[in-house]
Image: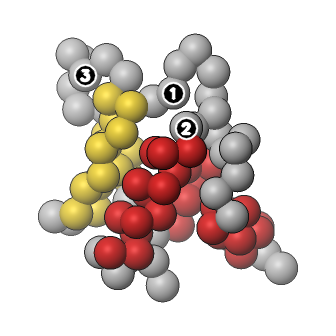
Amino acid sequence: MSTKEKLLCRFRSLPNDFTFDEVVRLFSYYGFELSNKGGTSGSRVAFVKGDASFMMHRPHPGNIVKKGVLKGIYEYLNSKEIAE
């Protein structure tokens, strides 16, 4: 099983300890790029690919993404048929 497949399998299980770095890698597998939305964006970030984008807040003070955000990412990738 490749590193990509392991990450996708881990993501699909919606774990409680999925990190922001893993989210960045996940989106990069689908061709998205991380955008900080300018100098006044604070913790808001966007993952952009052409016309498609997904916005979220960078987790702080830790690096663990909340379960609700993971569910939103899961639904977004499935609804947009971006995930293959």
Numbered label attached to residue 16: none
Residue at 69%, 64% in the rendered image: 13
Number of numbered discs on residues: 3
The residue singled out by tag 3 in the image is: 41
Which of the two marks, 2 or 3, is nearer to us in this view? 2
Numbered label attached to residue 66: 2
Horizontal and vertical percent for residue 56?
Answer: 36, 39
Q: Is residue 44 visible?
A: yes
Q: Is residue 24 visible?
A: no
Which of the two marks, 2 or 1, is nearer to us in this view? 2
Earlier residue among tags 2 and 3: 3
Q: Considering only vertical position in the picture, is 24 above or below 74?
A: above
Answer yes or no: do the residues labelled 2 and 1 have beta carbons within 8 Å?
yes
- Element under disc 1: loop
Residue at 39%, 31% in the rendered image: 57
Residue type beneath disc 1: Pro
Horizontal and vertical percent for residue 58?
Answer: 45, 30
The residue singled out by tag 1 in the image is: 59
State left or right for residue 56 relative to residue 28.
Answer: left
- Element under disc 3: loop
Answer yes or no: do the residues labelled 2 and 3 have beta carbons within 8 Å?
no
Q: Considering only vertical position in the picture, is 47 above or below 7?
A: above
Residue type beneath disc 2: Lys
Horizontal and vertical percent for residue 21?
Answer: 61, 41
The quadrant in which residue 72 appears is: bottom left
Farthest residue to the right: give it.
1
Q: Quadrant of the N terminus?
A: bottom right
Horizontal and vertical percent for residue 48?
Answer: 29, 54
Which class describes the residues within 10 Å of circle 2: few (<14), some (14-19), or many (20+)? some
